[in-house]
Image (tube, grey):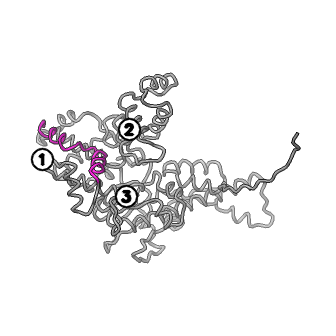
Amino acid sequence: MQKPATHLKLNLSTRLSAKLQQSLQVLQLSTLELQELVSGWLADNPFLEEVENTAEDATAFSQYVQPPQHSMIQGESDIWDTLADAPDMYALLRRQVCEYELDDDTAALIYFLIDNLNEQGYLDGSLTDLVENAPLEWRLDETELAHALTILQQFEPTGVGARNLQESLLLQLENMSPEPTNSDAIQTCARLLISEHFGQWLSTHQFKQLCRKLPQFSATTLEAACKLIGTLNPFPCYGLPDRNGILSIRPDLEVYADNSGHWQIRTLRDAFPQLRIEAGVEEWLQQEDAEMDAMCKSKWQEAQTCLQSLQMRKTTLQRLGEWILQQQQDFFSFGSLALAPLTIKETAQTLELAESTISRAINQKYLTCSQGVFPLRYFFSQSVAATDDSTGNSQTAIKSLLQSMINEEDPQHPYSDAYLVSQLAKQGINLARRTVAKYREALKIPPAHQRKVQYNNH
């Protein structure tokens, strides 16, 4: 019989403090979610109060972010002028038209479609109805309007221009950034569920029926696909302001050209809720006879943590915006063709932050500029076709170049994937044909023989 024994075991583990956990949570929230959280803080904590948007308080919460390659003296007297109001949803969509190389007629059709979107980003009615209800002198062609709609559906936010919920979800799914947890099987399953079995997974009984109808997918894959669909946005333009100025989520940063033509970046005033300790509380605490019970001390510590979390969010986003501006200056001048490769890992190393912190910082955050409005995640993409002498090109830039080349092709003799490979090679971009085909499919462009057939049928 063994005798009882006591053993010592050393185990090293890392745990985040409650303050750091809250700071990371605040950093990850979208602007709308942050505003809701701050409203809860104000209702629950008597020590906090909201700062009024006055010129005197401007320096307390909105600081000018200066690109490292340009120097500019910014005084406190005019710092309020660096804060910009966000344009409405329709203006943000119109800005993106200039991102594409379009002829005047196609651009006019896209503007027409944007004007016919509802406040949720959906296109009400069919293209046939739009053509029939348009003035006769416009001479709208349904085929040309359909082509313009295809381009509009590539705009941000993903899913805009859809004619129904299923189409919007499919657009979002096709343009979703690849995640380690989302395998090809899961995304294929999700597309099938949306297109052919929409809404047939809402109960346990329905889910079991799906498992029988789709034996090619395991129950685990089906469950993961349902969860993936649940992460998609049923309202494409949720988070962008409407014509009435009602705004759910506002862009956090804006890049603009100053009087000398240099790109600068600034924060948008509504993206950073401003709180402070209620006036008079700190003076009262400094008195010798001031005493706080346990409940007051707890609320006081919570108030300090809230302020620190907001400060960390603001500082991190400012540093991140400055870094994006420094790395992507050509994009702001020339559009997506000039988008440089940029990874989260590289950014984290430069800013001396964890990769998970960068991932949280770019989650549901937007930047507006002359090229349009873009999620911060848009500026991060892997390098493609890199050589020993170059850093390569970003996937987004290559897709944009492919789109431009196909837009200029002769419809009677569309470019094959092999020809596109050869043309890219002439510009120093060496890709395999299957890679070009993959990017073409991601742009929802059919192969050459189908494009020719479609043209001949029209």
Seen from the viewer's position, the closer of residues 124 and 77 is 124
11 up-or-down from 448: above or below: below
The magenta segment: 432-458
Number of callouts: 3
Regarding residue 27, the answer to whether it shows in the image is yes
Please tell me which of labels 3 and 1 falls first in the chain.
3
Q: Identify the residue shown where x is 46% and y is 51%.
A: 364
Per the picture, the main secondary structure of the magenta-coloured stretch is helix
Q: Nearer the viewer, mark 2 or mark 1?
A: 1
Question: Where on the picture, by quarter, is residue 257?
Answer: bottom left
Q: Identify the residue shown where x is 41% and y is 76%.
A: 72
Residue 7 screen position, x and y as percent: 82, 51
Q: Nearer the viewer, mark 3 or mark 1?
A: 1
Q: Are marks 2 and 1 in contact (CB under 8 Å)?
A: no
Q: Which mark is residue 368?
A: 3
Residue 61 screen position, x and y as percent: 52, 64
* Circle 3: element type: strand
Q: CA distance from mark 3 to mark 1?
A: 38 Å
* Circle 2: element type: helix
Q: Identify the residue shown where x is 62% and y is 57%.
A: 20
Residue 438 screen position, x and y as percent: 31, 47
* Circle 1: element type: loop
333 up-or-down from 456: above or below: below
Q: Which mark is residue 169?
A: 2
Residue 404 screen position, x and y as percent: 22, 54
Amino acid type, label 1: His
Within-10-Å neighbours for mark 3: few <14, some 14–19, many 20+: many
Q: CA distance from mark 2 to mark 1?
A: 33 Å
